[in-house]
Structure formats: C-alpha cells, structure tokens
Image: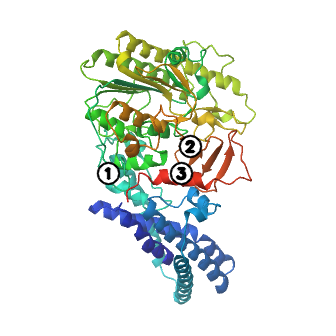
Amino acid sequence: MTNAMVLILIALRYIEAGHASTTIPGIAFAVAMYIAHASSMAMVLWLPALLTAFVWPQRHVVVTVAVAIGTGITALLFADTVVFQQYRFHINSALLALFFSDASAETFEFSIRMKLEMGGLLVSILLGQYLLAHLVWIGVQRTRYRSYGYVLATILVVVFIGTNLFHAYADATGDVTITRQTRLLPLFEPLTARGFLKDHGFDIAERPQTPTISNNGSFDYPRQPLSLHEPDKKPNIVIIAIDSWRFDAMTKDITPNIYSFAQDNIYFKQHFSGGNATRMGIFTLFYGIPGPYWFSALETRTRSALIERLDDLDYQFGIYRSAALTSPEFDRTVFAGMHGLRMRSEGQSSPQRDIDATQDFLNFLDERDSRQPFFGFVFYDSPHAYDLPDEAPMPFQPSWESVNFLALDQDTNPVPFFNLYKNSVHFVDGLVGKILAGLHAKDLMDDTIVIITGDHGQEFNDTGLGFWGHNSNYSRYQTKVPFIVHWPGKMSKRINYFTSHFDVAATIMKRLLGVDNAFHATSVGHDLFDNESRLPIIMAKYRGYAAYTGERFIVFPLISGVEVRGTDYRLINDASPSGRVIRKVLAQLSLFRSD
C-alpha cells in the first residue's frame, strides 16, 4: 500500500497531458480511478515480495525482493510519464524495440548531463525504496493484530468495483468527461457493458452521440484547420464494403458482377486494409489514420473528416449497414452526431439483413432529392457469417452447410470451408449487381464515384500456422482486400503499386470536396492515383498492431517482444526490426496527438 501511494504520486504527472476532467463526477472518478488502479497494480506487481515473506520470512531476503521490484516499477512508471507527456501514448513494444535496436543512438540522443541526471534519479529511487521497505518492516513488527486491514481491503474492493461500474455506465451514456481519463494510466482497461445495459432497459444503442470538439483530450484530428474552397462540382459518392472480403475472392467465377465492373474501371491490385478486423478496417477507410486512434475517436465522439465535409456541403446520406451500426460503435465514431441514422437492417440472419440493406439503398435512390448530391454506404455481412439463403446457388463444391468452429484445427481440410465462404461472397455479388444496375438505370454513373472494397480479409489456414478467420494475424490473407473504383473521366486500368485504406478519404476530399490540405491535416496516406511509397503500412487489430514493409511484417504485440515475420508470415528469429521503420510507425502514432 505504501508503494501504491508512490505510484499515485508519480502518476499525477499524467494530468499534465490534459485529459483530466473539471466536472465534479469527473474529478471523483479520477480520484477513484487512481486509487483503484494503483492499489490493484501494486497487489499484482509486489506479489513476489508477498510470497517471499510467506516462504522465506527473513528481513534481508524480503527487503531485497521488495526493493528490486519497487525500484524497477517506479523507474519504469516515471519513464512512461515522460513518454506520455511528449507523445501522448504509453511505452509500447515499438518504442522498446527502437530503444534496444542498432538505430537507438540515432533516435535517442542523451547528453552527459542527462545521463548523470538519469543515474542520480535511479539511485534516488533505489535509496527511497530501501527506506520505505525499512520503515514498513519496522511498522509490521510493532503492529499488533487489528481489524484495520480488513476495513481497508473492503474499501479498496468497493472503490475498484465502483470505478468499473461507473465507467461502464459513463461509456454507455457517452460521458466523455469520464471515459477519456482512462487513457491517462498505463494498462488500465476498465469495464464496459453497453450490451448488458441495453438488455436491461437503458436507451443505449439507438441514440447517436453528439461529437465533441475534435481535439478534446489528446486527440488532434484534424490536426490543423481544413483549408477549403467550394468544389466546382459535387459528384455523388457510393462506397460498397463487403465484410471479410479477401483479395483473391474477386474473380469471374466468385464475383461475376463485380469482376465485370472492374474490367471497365480502376482495379487496385495491391490494396491493403488498415486492419484485420471490421472496427479497424472501416475506421482507417473513413479516417485515413492508424487503427490505434480508434479509441480516442470513440472517447471524444470525433467523426470522420470526410463525413464532416460531406455534411457541410449538404450531401444527402444513405447509410445502410447489414449488422447493427452500434457494434462496432460507428454511430459514435464515423457517423457521430448524425441525426436519423438507420441503426440496423431487418431480418433474422445476415443474408436477410443484406437483402434488406440493398432494397433500402435502392429505395433511397428513388426517394432522394435529385437536386442534391448524395453519399451512399452499403456494408454487407454474409461472408463474415459464412451464410447465404437456403435457395441461393452454391456453385462451389464440396461446401459445408455451416461452420463448427470448435472442430477447426491444423488438420482440418480447408476446401469445403473455403467453398462455403466463396458461396456467401457469390451471393453478395448478386446484391452488389442490383445496386450497380440501379445506378445505371437512373443514369447516375456519369456523376457518381463508386468504390467497392472489403473491410479486411479472411484466412483459411493459408499460412499453414493454424489461423482461421480474421483478427489473429496481419498476413495478406487477413489484410489485403479488393479495391475497385469507378471515377467518371478516368480510364479503366490496373494499378499494381501499393495502396491502402489510408489513401481513400483524403483523396476524395482533396480531389472532389475542396479540401486543399486533406492529406496533411487528416491522413497518413497518399493520393490513390500517385505512385508514392506508402511503406510501411500500419495494420491494427483491437489490441496491437503491425507494420508491413512490403517484404516483412513487423508485429508489435501488447506484452511480448517485437516479432519480425516474412511475407509467408513465418517468424524470422535472427532478424531485428529496422530503426527507420519503427521511427515511421511511432511518428504516425503520435502525429494526431495534441501537444
């Protein structure tokens, strides 16, 4: 408990980063958050000292263990406060890899004075920990049995539970003054319970949240005011996204409608998503920035600059997602603050909801005001669910009827499973064909940008490493997606240089919507039609990220050390990550953090 108080005192330095709330509930939550997290972390981190006291209750042994732990943890926390104040993120595997790499000297330049100060600080921490251990030992020897410990433990448990429950409610009701503060403390993952609260009668999912000022807290997006001019023409824009659509599932047999469409338009053959899961794939598509910023966008209810600009230009919106728009929370990120959002499709299965979304979009085309431009977004789900209607054709055989995920292992034959997936993609291709036909029927193609892509890929043990589905690794099977663009005035062609979801929103804003500084202010990408080097490309999942260099994947797990993997996703044991690559990754991860 003494070291818990030490951790709290050091962690107060995080408040200088600007996350702290000034409301009474926010301040109360911050106090409880510090106490709950520091005490629980101290209990876990000093557990070896406690166990030593039970097993070998000798002063010199216990004190040595306690002092060693205390010195290491205190120094590391202080170092993390320095990193957080400068970069607005905590010490992570990428930063550690750079520090211990050969390129460390190029990046971290420590003067003699700074080294002496660091050494003096470390010695001071060591002596302070020894003094604390000595005083605590004396106190323990002189203290008779009392019930105070039980009272204190009860209070801490109540504070811990209360902090998590209050955060869950604040997250569900969109109280940013509470939730944004959780980014202050390292390794702090408080409870969220939107689904539970919704099931128990709270009005959670149906209520879009009003976005706050975009640079609230430490999220600086856009990172400078947009430089705007009135566009000469306002074309319609339609984005069609297919969940779990991998790069090699766009063929004449699997997707005949889309394949035919691609022959007459622009097909980007080396296109990567910004993640291996829906949350990160759609986030990077609409924002143009790496997936780890998702949490900041969610906490601050900062919507996509692309959607913001479309709204300012009085575009009509037709947003039709098959799955609920609340999971992931696109109603509180990409489309935050928009009124009248269609939150979900009708139907008991993914295919039924896909059909409903298609029909709703076609109805939107009939009912919209033809005097105004429109933005359409249709997001299909059936390939993610490996599902299609009973009456739908299944040209790819042998095919499973359904998936038993418990039966998947290294020895599972992937062919019938992959065929089921291809059959579901084939079904969605028919729905996409109806949308394309609807646009043609209304003579809209000459005035409409149409983008067809996937949010991420889908793996069927293609690497031979036992991976199935997505959100597990960053190989091309989970991150490379088809990308087809119909752009009136541009000739059909095949583009073979690397592109990514980071390029999309800023290209639209700069070329079509009159945003002169779209790339500098809102994206880490490049113009889709410029053959510039985009490497490394950051790819994220819900927790963790990697960098793709074109030849290797540099994987940055949350806890373990950095991994270097080849294009076959095999681990390269004798390779170390490039310092240049890591510096670029860290630069992108801090680019949209406020000073």
Given residues 90 and 426, the one toward you in this image is 90
Mark seen at residue 395: none
- For badge 1, the amino acid type reads Asp
- For badge 3, the amino acid type reads Val
Residue underneath mark 2: 535
Q: Count every numbered label the image shows and give the total.
A: 3
Question: Vertically, is 211 above or below 487?
Answer: below
Report whether 215 appears left or right of 80: left
Residue underneath mark 1: 175
> Sequence-wise, which precedes: disc 3 or disc 2?
2
Q: CA distance from mark 3 to mark 2?
A: 10 Å
Given residues 230 and 447, the one toward you in this image is 230
Dot in front, 3 or 2: 2
- For badge 2, the amino acid type reads Leu
Residue underneath mark 3: 585
* Colour style of the rendered protein structure: rainbow
> Sequence-wise, which precedes: disc 3 or disc 1?
1
Q: CA distance from mark 1 to mark 2?
A: 37 Å
Question: Vertically, is 3 above or below 418?
Answer: below
Whether residue 349 can be seen here: no
Report whether 47 appears left or right of 568: left
Residue 253: name its quadrant: top right
